[in-house]
Amino acid sequence: MLARRWESLILVLLVAVCVWAALGVDGFANTSNVSFLLLDTTEIALMALSMTFVVVAAEIDLSVASTLGLSCAVLGWLWNAGLSIEAIMPICLMVGTLCGAVNGLLVTRLGLPSLAVTIGTFALYRGLAYVILGDQAVADLPAAYTTPATQPLIPLVLVAALGVGAAVLLHATGVGRAVFAIGANQEAAFFAGIRVKRIKFWLFVASGAMAALASLILTFRYASARADNGVGLELAVVAAVLLGGVSIFGGRGSLPGVLMAVLLLGVVRNALILADVANEVLNFVTGLLLVASVLVPNLGALWRRRSTSQQEVP
Amino acid sequence: MDAVLALAEASKSFGAVRALREVSLRLVAGEAHALAGENGAGKSTLVKILSGVHRPDNGRILLDGAPVDFGRPADAQQAGVAVIYQEPTLFPDLSIVENIFMGRQPRTRFGRIDRTAMSEQARRLFARLGVHLDPEQAARGLSIADQQLVEIAKALSRDARVLIMDEPTAALSGNEVARLFGVVNALREQGCAVLFISHRLDEIFELCQRVTTLRDGTLVAEHLIADITPDDLVRRMVGRDLDALYPKQDSAPGEIALEVHRLTREGVFTDVSFQVRRGEIVALAGLVGAGRTEVVRTVFGIDRQDAGWVEVGGRRLRPASPTAAMAAGLALVPEDRRQQGLVMDLSIERNVALTGLADVRRGPLISRAAEHARARDWAVRLRLKFARLSDPVGVLSGGNQQKVVLAKWLARKPSVLIVDEPTRGIDVGTKAEVHRLLSELAVSGVAVLMVSSELPEVLGMADRVLVMHEGRLVAELPRDEATEESVMSAATGRTAA
């Protein structure tokens, strides 16, 4: 029930912000800006898809942007070494998958909290990216890839196809049911015969693979492979997931809500840039939306806890 | 003689449960007083009132005859009441002496902690207790028994006059118990009042001078130990009438459905072997902490055994895999309904579907119709009271929640059904329904293994009773030999099998 109402709220906000930007911000409502705006949310959208599963399962992956950076660095390094792009792309996807598998193993086999693990690998993967590529930018990538990446068609089709696939997987299959059960009560899920560790492992693997996929699009879009590609994107991804109505405590959320939130954040960001708002203010707004999206759904619960705390703690 | 600490007609309720009803108790200097009773008789509640954890709803606490109010555990400590628990809570990285004086370290003139004085005082405390422990040793690595002695020394350093010991011997060996009793006797002779709780009757008779028996939250009797025999005491602890709550039907046991062979989990249970046949209800009885729940958890694959194996229908199970256990036809209705049995935030139908996600599919997708039908089918058969199957299961009453747990497992048509405390915390009407259901399942050929702490339920339902004591299976009683006395005797370790 709450989830439905939250989704509707995000939809209303999205429409309102679009209307406001179209009327009040110069240069918002034209084809080239809208297609740029959509393109600019591709990487966040891709990573938000897998992040939704991870957060619904009551875990988190803060290493996605670093995984993306590592994959970009590998791409640039191998291109410099003379490999073809067709050979490099599967290698990049494998690197991302491996990054996810390392996170997954540390969380499920060693039982470490994913927050700590992925803060660690957040630094580790980004550091590795710099070790591999240093501070150079590899820019002489083939136009056969960089040109279509600046057109909205292919990225949009990719996001739409994967988005529908992910939504069906989460909301209409046994795996999705199991992910919700794990997030709501891991112990009860285990007692019901659900393979909690195995499922969590694959969620982290998927998260790493999606980050690598996003890295390919980002690299081609900017025609530049750098170790610092996508710095800070994990914040935008987590913000979109939480703003989309996924509970930070797990067990609740919906994929359509997350995709709408990705768009909402993209529109707000784009409109503010067009309105000449400084970059620092943009980060401030993203942070504000993130805090608000955690705070607002829990306000009721927090209020109740405050008013009853006297009885609960003797 | 005047009581150091007394409870006068104290009552305590938790919600609708009346844990303690007008219980009075007097602890006298120089006397060890035992508190006896079954699981759930109210012993722990009484201890928590005397130690300031709970405040009684009615009645008073008297210290040296004057009413006092223990609002917090610190108030009770201040008044000289010390509690020693089964599992001591020391800071493992601090030394023994630092643990003893935590928060009350003696200071030098310059305000620094006076280590010399601290060590000296600790040595004097241990001398008084007659034990040899190095005060500078770290608490980590001490045996439970030694940790308890440190706790006692801590209590003495606060000038405790009342020592409450809540099952202190549960984790101790014979020699350690003897040493602990030596210390307690010494303290008693020095004028301490002792309240001692133990499930081991022989210990009560060895250590104490007086015993108070609780049953269902009320005081049954108070005796001088000299005036009562162990058998009398058991009778007073359990003395209830078996009512007609248990509609047990006779069924003919068939072939062996579940065989547990020398199952061992180190430090938890040892060498447990038994069989359950189709059509049979076997109860696993024993006191809380005897290892019953741990055995069934391991049988179902929640925990991994160190030795031994489980066979279902003649096939050995892969260890530590609930998925494998379920595939073999096992089902477990766990002890903790809210945490293990159900996902409270999910709907009734999704909870029921959780054990059979492969059964409610059409192609690769979940069929909501199949999911709904599965839940509806079992809701009707179990007479579940609900508004909508899409409601969160958390809104149901305890008894109805338990029916949902049963539904989610019965929908799998298990050949072996394990139920752990199947009627804990549910109303009498639903309880009878659950009992009827278990009986019908057995008649239909299901092998039922039931863990229960309620003796009437055990005696009323079981074809055979297995009794566990301290991690071992100590008795196997056929229905006609299982009585409250025989089960309790075995459960308290008074007979060896």
Image (cartoon, coloured by chain):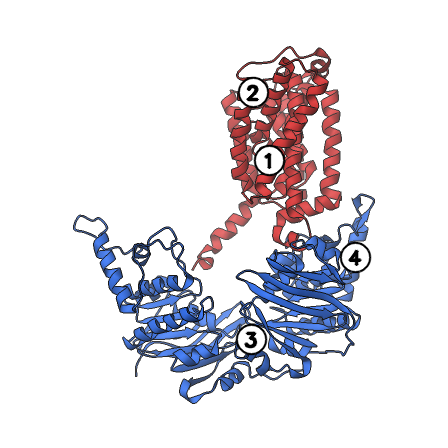
Chain colours: A red, B blue
Of tags 3 and 4, the one toward the viewer is 3
For residue B374, the mark is 4
Of tags 4 and 1, the one toward the viewer is 1
Rendered location of residue B225, percent (x, y): 41, 85
Rendered location of residue A115, percent (x, y): 53, 39
Q: Amino acid at mark 4?
A: Arg
- Give the residue drawn at x 55%, y 28%: A125
For residue A102, the mark is 1
- Badge 2: chain ID: A
Gap in angstroms between the C-alphas marked 3 and 4: 41 Å
Gap in angstroms between the C-alphas marked 2 and 1: 19 Å
Along the horizontal axis of the image, is A125 left or right of B67? right
Kindly indicate whether the residue at mark 3 contacts the one at mark 1 (C-beta within 8 angstroms).
no
Gap in angstroms between the C-alphas marked 4 and 1: 39 Å
Q: Amino acid at mark 1?
A: Val
If you read the primary sequence from the N terminus, does the residue marked by circle 3 or circle 4 appear first? Answer: 4
Judging depth in this view, the residue of B335 and B463 nearest the camera is B463
Outermost residue to the bottom: B227
Rendered location of residue B126, percent (x, y): 28, 64
Q: Which residue is mark 3?
A: B491
If you read the primary sequence from the N terminus, does the residue marked by circle 2 or circle 1 appear first? Answer: 1
| Secondary structure under the numbered disc 4 in the rendered image | helix
Kindly indicate whether the residue at mark 1 contacts the one at mark 2 (C-beta within 8 angstroms).
no
Of tags 2 and 4, the one toward the viewer is 2
Gap in angstroms between the C-alphas marked 3 and 2: 66 Å
Q: Amino acid at mark 2?
A: Ile
| Secondary structure under the numbered disc 2 in the rendered image | helix
